Image (cartoon, grey):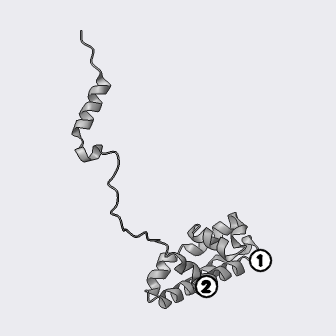
Amino acid sequence: MRRVNIAGLVLSAALSALPVAALAQHPEAPPSGGTTVDLQGGDAWRKDPHMRQFYDTVVKAFAKGPSKVDAPALETASFAIFRDFAISKGMNPDAMQDHLKLIPRQMIQIAREDPAVLKDYDTFLDALFGPK
């Protein structure tokens, strides 16, 4: 009786069903001369006075302690800042507010878990955007 390697047959059948391109180990290298883009806007967001104003607003909201933060008031103040930011950049303020609507409560959560994120502006921005 002849022995059959079932696993080998299954693998062989599966591989033969794949297009040849799927067997390539590495994708083609991107064309040279490409540009790296920071989807967060790079230093533009970090240097914008509206982000400094947002930081000051969050710090003020935490002035009486993490458990006393008035989340709706922080949202209202933040949304006004986000709308002004959009207008200053020629963007739609409604769209910007919608885009950033979760940020105030996320910052409350982040700062409650790690109050050190409010120690200075750069640390705050790293918590907000990630390190640069």
Residue 102, how many percent across, how many down? 54, 72
Q: Is residue 84 above or below residue 109?
A: below
Locate the C terminus and report the quarter of the image it occupies: bottom right
Q: Give the side of residue 96 with respect to residue 121, left or right.
A: left
Callout 1, which amino acid?
Lys
Q: Earlier in the sequence, mark 2 or mark 1?
A: 1
Q: Is residue 123 above or below residue 5?
A: below
Residue 121, how many percent across, how many down? 67, 77
Label 1 belongs to which residue? 64
Q: Secondary structure at mark 2?
A: helix
Residue 4, how many percent across, how many down? 27, 18
Q: Residues within 10 Å of mark 1 (few under 14, many from 20)?
A: few
Residue positioned 28% across, 46% down in the render: 22
Label 2 belongs to which residue? 77
Q: Give the side of residue 43 with respect to residue 122, left or right.
A: left
Residue 45, how many percent across, how many down? 54, 79
- Visible in this render: residue 98? yes
Residue positioned 55% across, 83% down in the render: 79
Callout 2, which amino acid?
Ala
